[in-house]
Amino acid sequence: MIRREFIKNSALAGLAFSQPAGSFIIPSQTKKYRTVIIGAGWWGNNILGEAMASGACDIVGVCDVDQNLVDETVERVEKLMGNRPKKYTDYRELLHDLKPDIAIIATPEHWHALQTIEALKTGCHVYVEKPIAHTINEGKAIVAAQKKYGKVIQVGLHRRTSPHIIKGQQMLRNGEVGDVKMIKACVYSRTTETMVKPTDNPPEYLDWDLYLGPAAYQAYEPSVHPRGFRKYLNMTNGTIGDWGVHWMDQILWWSEEQYPKKIYSTGGMVNPGCGYDAPDYQSATFDFDNFIVEWEHRRLGGSGSEKSPVGTYFYGTKGVMFLGFYDGATFYPNDRDKEPVHIEHGMHDPDGQNIKELWQDFLEAIEGKKQPVAGIESSHRATTMSLLAMISYKTGRQILWDGEAEMILDDPEALSLMQREYREPWEYPEINS
Ligand SMILES: NC(=O)c1ccc[n+]([C@@H]2O[C@H](COP(=O)([O-])OP(=O)(O)OC[C@H]3O[C@@H](n4cnc5c(N)ncnc54)[C@H](O)[C@@H]3O)[C@@H](O)[C@H]2O)c1
């Protein structure tokens, strides 16, 4: 039986537990940021809650292609803040009418590039969800636009502000884990045997055409919304592009943002006739100069079969550091005379997150006090790792990556998958937009 040493780090414990929702008010805050939300679904409303609790934001506009969600979110804001934000279905109208200071973007990721760039152009600071893009060149275009318009982007990689992760990262950097040569990141979940049946009959309250936007046309089916877009590669990049980006970000954070040179991925579907195409199981290997990374995802087997179903293991010469989710972080020393060091998670409910801390960091970056902890460049690199694995998955070949030039080498077909055709009238963003 493993005995655990529970670290009582007062600063970390304070960060995690002594800040009830609503108490995170910036001292001497006089200006209220006129804030809007684009994508008022599950995660968008989690972010919106922290924006309201910060005391620094007035919520002036709500946009979603689902009219019911717009109505519900406006009711929520009115109840908590006393004002009724304006309602929008089209994000372009919202941005151009209201010219807000801050835009929260929590739509499915096939929208992130167009909406983030439009928000930057209209003068907003942007809090956009991960993954930052659906194809690599979209990510490059966002990075270029951020440089051009000079606004702050915070990406929703809230694990950068999770107390247990920060402490685990410190231990990795201090050399307590030794020389790390191998890293494994994983997400395991229960078997799902979903068959999807397109109806092409979207509900009246949902603007399906504007939901799809630049993605290729696909018939509506009831499980796609809310949250079910994750099943379709037309709108996402599978679990590695969703959950995986959090862990790729941790790996790059530790490695000071190096990039892999060779990437190979394979995987598949439990039932290829199910009607969706995001892989149910997938592995990927990333070759860096001095270490290798393995990714493993599977939606196979009963829940509880894996001790830690979600997390990243750093294998070093002095032991193993595990950075996890609700199971916190644990260092397992090689030296058997030493006890494992356990750090409890310090995340908030609902949904195990540290958005409160990330939002605070965002506001401080807007005030010019610091760079955002999950800024666009590092988040682009983390997203790119996942997207490269998906290009390998799609082509069935190893990808050679020139991370300086951000180009795939010696493989025109794979290179072409750094971009995709947009459905008219949407136009793929220019890298120098
Ligand atoms: N950081 C995290 O830990 C975390 C956790 C969950 C989700 N997310 C991210 O948040 C994003 C949203 O995921 P979700 O689970 O909340 O999904 P969701 O389906 O609940 O919400 C997405 C919303 O976007 C809306 N939408 C679609 N197209 C739109 C458009 N053109 N304009 C305005 N609204 C539009 C949908 O109607 C939906 O309400 C994704 O990028 C996801 O990866 C991040």
Image: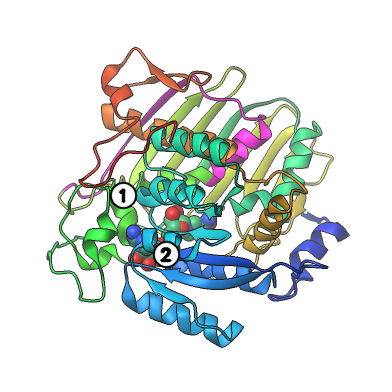
Count the labels in the image: 2
The stretch in magenta equals 246-272
Is residue 270 in the magenta section? yes
- Mark 2 and ligand 1: say if the CB distance to the nearest ligand atom is below 8 Å: no
Q: Is residue 92 above or below residue 421?
A: below
At label 2, which amino acid type do we have?
Answer: Leu
Disc 1 designates what residue?
235
The image quarter containing residue 30 is: bottom right
User: Quick one: label 2, few (<14), some, or many (20+) residues within 10 Å?
Assistant: many
Q: Which secondary structure lies at badge 2?
A: helix
Disc 2 designates what residue?
94
Q: In the drawing, what numbered circle is on residue 136?
A: none
Q: Is residue 161 visible?
A: yes
* Image quadrant containing the C terminus: top left
The image quarter containing residue 172 is: top right
At label 1, which amino acid type do we have?
Answer: Met
Is residue 33 in the magenta section? no
Q: Residue at x 70, y 73 (%)?
A: 55
* Image quadrant containing the N terminus: bottom right
Q: Residue at x 69, y 69 (%)?
A: 54
Q: Position of residue 226 (x, y in %)?
A: 34, 67
Contact check, label 2 and label 1, Cβ < 8 Å? no
- The CA span between labels 2 and 1 is 23 Å
Q: Position of residue 44 (x, y in %)?
A: 48, 65
- Mark 1 and ligand 1: say if the CB distance to the nearest ligand atom is below 8 Å: no
Q: Is residue 288 left or right of residue 232?
A: right
Q: Residue at x 19, y 61 (%)?
A: 196
Q: Residue at x 82, y 64 (%)?
A: 14
Q: Is residue 76 above or below residue 396?
A: below
Q: Give whichever of 333, 66 is nearer the camera.
A: 66
Q: Which secondary structure lies at badge 1?
A: loop
- Tell which residue pokes out farthest to the top in this image: 410
